[in-house]
Structure formats: C-alpha cells, structure tokens
Image (cartoon, rainbow, N blue to C red):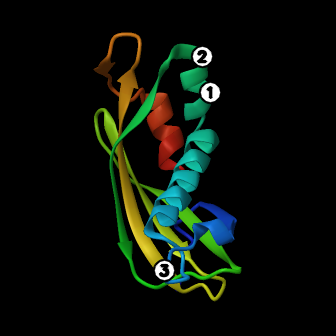
Amino acid sequence: MDYSDYKLSIGLRIDWSDLDMYKHVNNLAFIRFMQTGRSLFWEATGLTKIFEESNKGPMVVSTHCDFKKSLYYPGTAIVKTKLAFIKNSSFGLDHIILNKAMEVCAEGRDVAVFYDFNTNKTYTIPDDLREIMKDY
C-alpha cells in the first residue's frame, strides 16, 4: 500500500509494559502511539511553539481508534500521521499504525479545536498557520 500522503512517520519500540494479559499490545498503548503522532504534527507545524509563546493552541476534543491487527513484543509500531481536514477553528488528524511488515494494525482520528487558554474560548485558525498545516 502507498502511504506517501502521510508526511509524518515515527517508529516506536514496543515495550513489555505495552502488553495486556493476552500478550499483545494493549488498546491504551495504541492511543499513546497516536498521541506521539499528534505531538509530531504539533512540533512540525509550530503548534507547540505557538502555545509556549501565546498560551493558545490545539486542544483535543475527540480521539477514535479502530483496531485491525494485533501488535506484539518485541516489535516496532510505525505511526504515520496526516492532516485529515481543517475547518474554521478545528482540524482532524488521521493516523495509521503499522507493524514491521507494514501491515495496518490500527487506524485512528483525532479532532482538535484551536483554543485560547487566556480567554477560555475557541478561535479561528490563522491563515498562515492553516497553510503550514496543509503541508502535512
């Protein structure tokens, strides 16, 4: 399969502590893997820096994960992330989690809103930032 539209990718070592009683990666670990992909997007687009400088930035309002295939220890989870959509004050990220054989083990989506933590209100995504985000 072609994953070239996923501009961000990171390999994560599966730890023994990621396992459940069935000896495969626990569902919660998949959510943490998606969080790593989300963090990678925030860093690549400058969202982390914007938050540090202004106390404004994305706030996750929804996360969803469909499990397709088990992951096992020892192993590697490959997380690929891309912008799914962008609206006025919200955006979505799509994630796929692959095993070393490049088989899809999970598909997920996060939805975040841009939030001003100074005023406790959402705000419109600035046009310049919108253009940067579209590159991912």
Q: State whether residue 30 is above or below residue 22.
A: above
Residue 100 at what x, y percent from top left?
A: 66, 83
Packing grade of label 1 (10 A; few <14, some 14-19, many >=20) is: some
In this rendering, position of residue 59 left or right of residue 35: left
Q: Kindly indicate the quadrant of the structure image that contains residue 45.
A: top right
Residue 114 at what x, y percent from top left?
A: 37, 30
Give the alpha-carbon distance from disc 1 to disc 3, as whole Å: 32 Å
Give the SS element for disc 3: strand
Report which residue position mark 3 lands on.
Answer: 105
Find residue 28 and name its label.
Answer: none
Q: Nearer the viewer, mark 2 or mark 3?
A: 3
Residue 3 at what x, y percent from top left?
A: 54, 75
Res. 136 in view: no
Give the alpha-carbon distance from disc 1 to disc 2, as whole Å: 6 Å
Residue appearing at x 57%, y 46% in the figure: 39
Of 132 and 101, nearer the camera is 101
Q: Nearer the viewer, mark 1 or mark 3?
A: 3
Residues at discs 2 and 3 in contact (Cβ within 8 Å): no
Packing grade of label 2 (10 A; few <14, some 14-19, many >=20) is: few
Amino acid marked by disc 2: Glu
Report which residue position mark 1 lands on.
Answer: 49
Residues at discs 1 and 3 in contact (Cβ within 8 Å): no
Give the alpha-carbon distance from disc 2 to disc 3, as whole Å: 37 Å
Res. 67 in view: yes
Find residue 53 and name its label.
Answer: 2
| 1 or 3: tag closer to the N-terminus | 1
Give the SS element for disc 2: helix
Q: Kindly indicate the quadrant of the structure image that contains residue 123.
A: top left
Q: State whether residue 10 is above or below residue 53.
A: below
| 2 or 3: tag closer to the N-terminus | 2
In this rendering, position of residue 115 left or right of residue 73: left
